[in-house]
Amino acid sequence: MSRVEKPHVLLADDNEATCTLLTALLHRDFNVEAVFDGRETIERLRTRRYAVLLLDLRMPNADGFAVLDFLKEHQPAMLPRVLVVTAAVAARDLQHAESYGLCGVVTKPFEVETLLATVKKCAALDDANPLGPMLCSSGPVILFLADLLRQRLM
């Protein structure tokens, strides 16, 4: 039986420590690719489809708002799968970001469980990932389904 590929997450943040931490937190459930500026984020979005984009608003070479503008113009279906993960910024900037119809906003420092649950919720919105909603399910449910499938195939 072939192994189901993990959903791909693009992590866009110019802070390497944050990227290392988030990659470590997400690697169990997701394939994580990290980029460190807005221009590189846009290039990756042009060439690959992602289940979730974790986006910092403050980055060099095009900030998070430039990335959101790119998505609004070229890939509007991706906007509901964008999770902004950013340090404290002005309330008006957060309102501006939320006006794009994002999956959510998590401010740094964040609670690990809250972040993980929110990323899984965003991934569950991915129509291209038929197992998306199951990411939010508990492990026993997935094991039960796997056992049921194995019994049917034998």
Image (tube, rainbow, N blue to C red):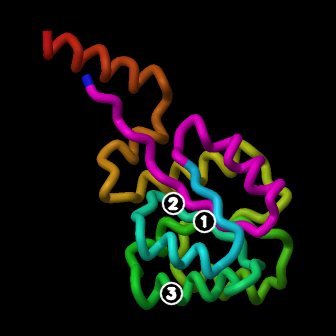
Q: Calculate the distance from the C-alpha at mark 3 to the C-alpha at mark 1.
A: 15 Å
Q: Looking at the picture, does residue 113 appear above or below residue 119?
A: above
Q: Is 16 or 7 nearer to us in this picture? A: 16
SS assignment at label 2: strand
Q: Disc 2 marks which amino acid?
A: Val
Q: Position of residue 84 (x, y in %)?
A: 66, 69
Label 1, label 2: how many angstroms apart (C-alpha)? 7 Å
Q: Residues within 10 Å of mark 1 (few under 14, many from 20)?
A: many
Q: Quadrant of residue 49?
A: bottom left
**Which mark is first along the chain, 3 or 2?**
2
Report x, y in % for residue 115.
68, 51
At numbered mark 1, what does the secondary structure look like: helix, strand or loop?
strand
The residue that label 1 is drawn on is: 83
Residue at x 74%, y 86% (from the top left corner): 93
Disc 3 secondary structure class: helix
Whether residue 11 appears in magenta in the rendering, the answer is: yes
Residue 52: which disc?
Answer: 2
First in sequence: mark 1 vs mark 2: 2
Res 70 label = 3
Left of 66 or right of it: where is 130? left
Q: Quadrant of the N terminus?
A: top left
Quadrant assignment, res 38: bottom right
Labelled pair 2, 3 in contact (Cβ < 8 Å): no
Q: Which residues are magenta?
A: 2-31
